[in-house]
Amino acid sequence: MQKKTIITAGIALLACTSAHAIDEKYRQQLERSGCTQVSELQGCDIHKSRAENAQAGFASPAPAATTSASGQTPYAGQWVARSTSGRTLATIRIDDNERVWLNGKSVQAKRSDGALVFRDGNILYTIQGDRRLKNEDHWADFDAGTQGPITAE
């Protein structure tokens, strides 16, 4: 009986320990150098900078500043929500601080999975932040079961 308890406790103890594939220092070196574990095996040097590894052809250069860092937001501008028949349902204005006005009335908005989401009554509006994605801006009235596109003006 005691042997079973010891074995069970040992298995539980081994199962509870967390295993980390790489340590924190190594992860930081990979991030700074722009290398991955695979590219390091192919010759990428984790002791060099991202730019030096990019020159050697192993890593991409440092990413450019994002739109939020430069003060621009992909949501800013005038938008129109239309029904499937083409009738204008709402006009939407979003400023550079991501404040939203729906038909001239201020509404609360939040970011969710890369999109700006806001609600007016039963209608939920979603404007995608990645402008490369097409036909992702839409509104949906879940009570009526209707939905339609939102387009930039």
Image: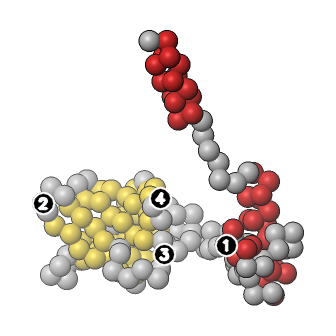
- Whole-percent x, y for residue 137 in the image: 35, 74
Residue receiving disc 4 = 111
In the depicted view, which residue is nearer to us: 99 or 6? 6
For the residue carrying disc 3, how many other residues have a C-alpha within 10 Å: few (<14), some (14-19), or many (20+)?
few
Residue receiving disc 3 = 130
Question: How far is the residue under mark 2 from the one under mark 4?
Answer: 25 Å
Farthest-out residue, left: 144
SS for dot 4: strand
SS for dot 1: helix
For the residue carrying disc 4, how many other residues have a C-alpha within 10 Å: few (<14), some (14-19), or many (20+)?
some
The amino acid at mark 1 is Val
Farthest-out residue, right: 47
Q: Which mark is residue 144?
A: 2
Q: Earlier in the sequence, mark 2 or mark 1?
A: 1
Q: Earlier in the sequence, mark 2 or mark 4?
A: 4
Question: Is 46 positioned to the left or the right of 98 in the image?
Answer: right
Which residue does the image show at 51% across and 24% down from the upper left?
Answer: 7
The answer to whether mark 3 and mark 1 are in CB contact below 8 A is no
Q: Toward which corner of the image does residue 10 lie, by quadrant?
A: top right
The amino acid at mark 4 is Arg
Question: How far is the residue under mark 4 from the one under mark 3?
Answer: 12 Å
Q: Earlier in the sequence, mark 2 or mark 3?
A: 3
SS for dot 2: loop
